[in-house]
Amino acid sequence: MTVHDVEDTVHQAEAAEGGHTVREVEHEITVSAPADAVYRLIADVENWPRIFPPTVHVERVEGDDREERIRIWATGNGEVKHWTSRRVLDRAGLRVDFRQEVSTPPVAAMGGAWIIENLPSGQCRVRLLHDYRAVDAAGLAWLDEAVDRNSRTELAALKENAERGLAAEDEGLLCSFEDAVRIDGTAKDVYDFINEAHLWPERLPHVDSVRLDEPVPGLQTLEMDTRSKDGSAHTTKSHRVTFPHRKIAYKQITLPALMTLHTGYWTFTDTGSGVTASSQHTFVLDTGNVARVLGPDATTADAVAYVRTALSTNSLATLGAAKAYAESRG
């Protein structure tokens, strides 16, 4: 399944607001899975970073299973953008409508709908509709490209996940876990240590080098070279979303050889007598590289355990260093 299998039609109209062009665009795909199952994947936005490649992080601000307000951070043409949307969920009608309440330039306005239709074959058709305006002509060209690329990518990913039934979990390829430490310090100091990743090479022995870019406060791109306990070196690149002094969420876009997905977050919780700091990881194993990396006799379970141990070791080392830093500051 590739993004080229996504069908699309494009309609264009002139808006009344100052003569700005409004694009009306529709993409669709046929999915060999029950419509209800596809609807659930679309409705559960907090699972989107795992399903949709462009999505970095999603938070539900408020709502229920009928209407909600969400905040989304996702890439468009390689840039991370964020916005706030309101969604209306119609499970019986197999439809989710969305409208951005707070947009980020070059978007002036954006809305649309996910529509799922049962087919006589037992398959379902998923239609993804967008209507949008840009702040200027250059922005409209950027949006045309971003909406088309993301729509195709998201529909292809939706099809793959729905048809496999998120089978990575069933096949033992998906792993989620969390490490936590108790710190006698403040959430701000612990948060600062994790946020200031450009200082990690001098603070963390397993980090060789770091390239940290933060073009907009709260949105970071972190590329770093690390070394595992067995001496193997890895280069990773992540987009990070920061919430002072509460949470830092991330999604890796350049992954080590044994993973096809890696998302996670750091949390910092005041307990009244200190801080609980945690590191959460979710990853999917890349089975195609197991023999090359771990040898021909390595099993899937061996590889999952290896990756989990490597991630946990580095997380606990980072949390330990953050603990020492925060407690040294009194």
Image (cartoon, grey):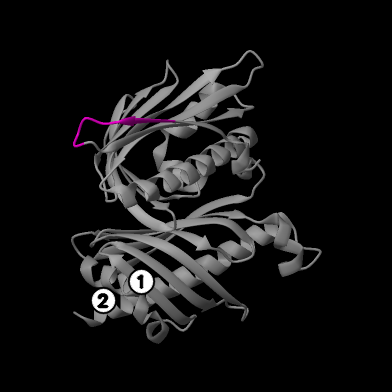
The residue identified by callout 2 is: 326
Q: 223 or 321: nearer the eye?
A: 223
User: Element at badge 1?
Assistant: strand
Q: Do the residues labelled 1 and 2 touch (CB within 8 Å)?
A: no
Residue 38 against residue 171 in the figure, above or below: above
In this picture, residue 150 sits left or right of residue 120:
left
Q: 104 or 253: nearer the eye?
A: 104
User: Element at badge 2?
Assistant: helix
In this picture, residue 85 sits left or right of residue 172:
left
Determine which quarter of the picture holds residue 60.
top left
The residue identified by callout 1 is: 213
Please tell me which residue is depicted at 44% across the width and 54% down the height of the picture.
77
Identify which amino acid the numbered label 1 is placed on.
Asp
Q: Give the range drawn in magenta.
A: 11-18
In magenta stretch: residue 16:
yes
Q: Residue furthest bottom?
A: 202
Residue 112 against residue 305 in the figure, above or below: above
Q: Position of residue 45 (x, y in %)?
A: 40, 39
In this picture, residue 66 sits left or right of residue 157:
left
In magenta stretch: residue 128:
no
Residue 111 against residue 278 in the figure, above or below: above
Q: 164 or 81: nearer the eye?
A: 81
Q: Marks 1 and 2, how far apart in space? A: 24 Å
Q: Where is residue 97 in the image (x, y as percent from the top left)?
A: 35, 27
